[in-house]
Image (tube, helix red, strand yellow):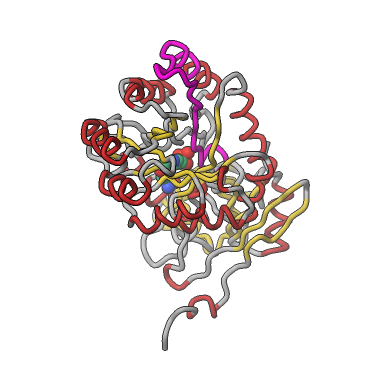
């Protein structure tokens, strides 16, 4: 399911470019793919909203019945603002000041603590009174590239599983109520066995926590960015997770719920970044097509060498030629090298696909350029859900 060129051209005509457009139906269908694959298991999904936090996206996620995972106290507050009940909000922290955990506790959300120091402080303050989760580092290397790998033995995330004895000592000292064990090994994980490996690491740890209610396997499902690209096989994952738990019933008797925190899987494909070609420039055998955007709007190609499919929706049947697609930032900001695209003229609209996750969310005002507007399409209705910046936004908060 995807938006048609016609819808994208209409959105660009109505709201200008560069423009982020999101399709609510794609989010819904991605969520349904997860829930139907895991229908036989007691599984909960928490949307990792760091991928895209526009309040209207959060409301849509809430309305379709998905929960939400947050990576800062502000994301927690946005989720509550969107109308999520605290019981549907998870705060998976990393490297944060204890005051944020205290605030999250006051707000009544689920919390995963990722350091011994904060676990100790939590124990001192709340003892057994507030059930809490522990974020563990499983020492598993996984993910599309090192920048998005979080579970390996040099990663800052989580408490290393090798420190289990110390964790248990803290839990015992304060009689902590540990209800959840969390791991997240990375992003763009296509191999479902990575998740199984994670579960196996947890099986050795689970018996030490007799009040455990859930196991949280994080996010990281891979989405296809181009034709022929692999994606995580979700039905196979469901089958393997179910099999792993069937072979290892919780020794404490309680069936354990399984949690996941998908970000990209839910919102990557729903998003489109529409740009307009400012200039064509020939240099030897290279043809640059420079668009009215840059890594200030979509950083993934420059930051992670990520591939985003690009189409010239103004001339979809034109003859194919090879282009290098660049932005207008005063620094190298190449979106794609040597990419075959239908013949481009200045003024054409180039669309970047899979721009929903970590697109707008990682945008900036670098070069004092405006952040794009955002539009959400629900049931065929286009709704502006964020205005494009204006000049005053650049001066806002500056003290002259
Ligand atoms: N849970 C935790 C604890 C995480 O740290 C993340 C992502 C997720 C869930 C969701 O992962 P996802 O399902 O979206 O792969 N900006 C990078 C991705 C960084 C992911 C950071 N953590 C990118 O654009 O590829």
Tell which residue pokes out farthest to the bottom in this image.
400
Image quadrant where one finds the N terminus = top right
Tell which residue pokes out farthest to the right in this image.
380
Bounds of the magenta segment: 241-267
**Is residue 170 something that shows in the picture?**
yes
In this rendering, the answer to whether 272 lies above or below 295 is: above
- Give the quadrant of residue 100: bottom left
- Where residue 31 appears, x then y in whole percent? 62, 35
Left or right: 72 with respect to 137?
A: right
Number of residue marks: 0
- Where residue 258 appears, x then y in whole percent? 49, 27
Nearer-the-camera pick, 217 or 77: 77
Residue found at x 31% / y 21%: 204
Residue found at x 57% / y 71%: 389
Residue found at x 54% / y 51%: 52
Image quadrant where one finds the C terminus = bottom left
Q: Is residue 252 magenta?
A: yes
- Where residue 88 appears, x then y in whole percent? 57, 43
Left or right: 218 with respect to 205?
A: right
- Where residue 189 appears, x then y in whole percent? 42, 31
Q: Is residue 376 magenta?
A: no
**Is residue 306 something that shows in the picture?**
no
Residue found at x 39% / y 33%: 181
Left or right: 265 with respect to 112?
A: right
Q: Quadrant of ligand 1?
A: top left
Left or right: 216 with respect to 66?
A: left
């Amino acid at each position: 399911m995807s938006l048609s060129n016609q819808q994208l051209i209409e959105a660009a005509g109505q709201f200008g470019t560069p423009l982020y457009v999101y399709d609510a139906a794609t989010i819904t269908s991605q969520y349904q793919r997860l829930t139907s694959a895991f229908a036989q298991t007691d599984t909960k999904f928490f949307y990792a909203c760091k991928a895209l936090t526009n309040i209207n996206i959060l409301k849509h996620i809430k309305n379709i019945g998905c929960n939400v995972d947050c990576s800062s106290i502000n994301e927690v507050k946005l989720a509550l603002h969107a109308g999520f009940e605290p019981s549907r909000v998870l705060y998976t922290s990393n490297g944060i000041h204890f005051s944020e955990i205290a605030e999250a506790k006051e707000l009544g959300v689920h919390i995963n603590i990722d350091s011994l120091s904060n676990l100790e402080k939590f124990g001192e303050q709340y003892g057994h009174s507030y059930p809490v989760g522990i974020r563990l580092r499983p020492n598993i290397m996984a993910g599309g590239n090192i920048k998005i790998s979080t579970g390996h033995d040099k990663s800052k995330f989580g408490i290393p599983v090798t420190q289990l004895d110390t964790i248990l000592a803290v839990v015992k000292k304060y009689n902590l109520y540990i209800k959840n064990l969390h791991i997240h090994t990375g992003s763009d994980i296509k191999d479902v066995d990575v998740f199984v490996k994670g579960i196996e690491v947890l099986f050795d740890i689970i018996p030490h926590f007799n009040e455990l209610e859930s196991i949280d396997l994080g996010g990281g499902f891979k989405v296809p960015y181009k034709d022929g690209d692999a994606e995580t096989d979700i039905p196979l994952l469901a089958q393997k997770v179910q099999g792993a738990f069937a072979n290892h019933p919780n020794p404490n008797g309680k069936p354990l719920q399984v949690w996941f925190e998908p970000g990209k899987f839910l919102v990557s494909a729903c998003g489109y970044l529409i740009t307009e070609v400012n200039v064509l420039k020939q240099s030897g055998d290279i043809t640059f097509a420079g668009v009215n955007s840059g890594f200030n709007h979509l950083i993934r190609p420059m930051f992670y060498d990520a591939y985003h499919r690009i189409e010239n929706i103004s001339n979809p049947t034109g003859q194919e030629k090879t282009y290098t697609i660049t932005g207008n930032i005063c620094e190298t900001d190449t979106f794609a090298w040597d990419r075959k695209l239908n013949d481009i003229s200045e003024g054409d609209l180039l669309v970047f696909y899979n721009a929903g996750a970590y697109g707008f969310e990682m945008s900036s005002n670098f070069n004092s350029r405006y952040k794009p507007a955002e539009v959400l399409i629900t049931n065929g209705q286009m709704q502006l859900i964020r205005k494009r910046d204006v000049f005053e936004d650049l001066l806002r908060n500056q003290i002259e």
